[in-house]
Image: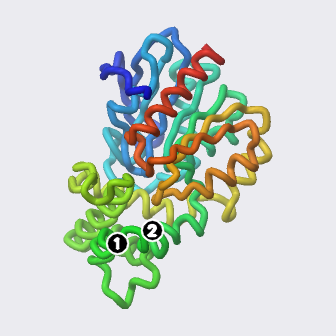
Amino acid sequence: MLKLYPPIDARRSGRLRVSDLHEIYWEESGNPDGLPVIAVHGGPGGGSSPEMRRFFDPELYRIILFDQRGCGRSTPHSELEGNDTWALVDDMEKIREMLGIDKWVVFGGSWGSTLALSYAVTHTEHVHGLILRGIFLITEAEIQWFYQDGASRIFPDAYDRYVEPIPEEERGDLLHAFHKRLVGDDRKARKAAAKAWACWEGETISIKGPSSRPAKFEENEFADAFARIECHYFVNKGFFPEDGWLLKQAAEKLQGMPGIIVHGRYDVVTPIGTAWALTKAWPDAKLHIVPDAGHSSLDNGIIDQLISATRTFAKKFG
């Protein structure tokens, strides 16, 4: 089974002013003459991490990471104004142009798959191919499943902790109940809602359940940006024109573009049915179902398949 490549440091990094309000962090590692790849983090609001560099052979890839608006090392922290899907797509284009890259591989998981697909259907001519994990298209069905009723039946213990900050009379619409608190002026309520929201995802990303929750989901600064930005995007339905829009666009615009999709069979955060629907609409994408994995990119089987995918693309486009 393939393992992550050894840790590496960023070779260079910087900050890019993308609007009057927002400045984003970017970095580059690996081989400056290698195959360019942009790795798109999840959330939205999750921020990039050093582990993301390790899915790529640093001898073969020119690895680009960035922190999306409002999170990670980008500023202002946890900011919602001017923060939407199409602003982030434009930010990716600004990074590509700044670095003088003509075409690159786009790699992303969870919300990162949403943004990667949004970029690819908008700037198809600049994408060699897509490597995606944990497909998420921000449909009403997906939001209802994870944030209202569905995953709750598999992780009822974690779900009780998730809904604790919300009074019972408001639990019929948890998305908007959380949103009210996350954008409100009550700092105590905002902190409690952010931590509950973040920990819910942290406790369900692995098939091991709540005991394997990553520590960062309890950190106040991380949880605030993660919860506020996610909820902002989901209340606004991903800023897409209609429900299911991204799937329709993929079916129309990604024909002929190679894709590799890796999805855990027991992914509760982003159930596999969405990945299945995407591969039916986009037959040039190959779906690899990992039989003993959930949503986490660091499950062993997920790592194995993602690194296999990056090796395949290095041979194909390098």
**Circle 2 crowding by C-alpha within 10 Å: few under 14, some 14–19, many from 20:** many
- Above or below, 45 against 33 in this view is below
Q: Residue, x 27% and y 77% (percent of image)?
A: 165
Quadrant containing the N terminus is top left
Coloration mode: rainbow
Q: Answer left or right for 118 relative to 23.
A: right
Q: Amino acid at mark 1?
A: Tyr
Question: What kind of element bears circle 2?
Answer: helix
Q: Looking at the image, which residue is at 33% across and 54% down?
A: 208
Residue carrying label 2: 151
Pointer 1: residues within 10 angstroms few (<14), some, or many (20+)?
many
In the displayed structure, 310 sits above or below 117; it is above
Q: Residue at x 54, y 46 (%)?
A: 263
* Residue 246 position in % (x across, y down): 67, 53
Q: Which residue is farthest bottom? A: 169
Residue 21 seen in this snapshot: no
Is 229 placed above or below 144 here?
Answer: above
Disc assigned to residue 159: 1
Instruction: State left or right for residue 111 relative to residue 21.
Output: right
167 versus 19 height, above or below = below
Task: Measure the alpha-carbon separation of dots 1 and 2.
Answer: 8 Å
First in sequence, mark 1 or 2: give its number.
2
Q: Of the residues shown, which amino acid type is indicated by label 2?
A: Ala
Mark 1–mark 2 contact, CB under 8 Å? yes
Count up the numbered dots.
2
Name the quadrant containing residue 239: bottom right
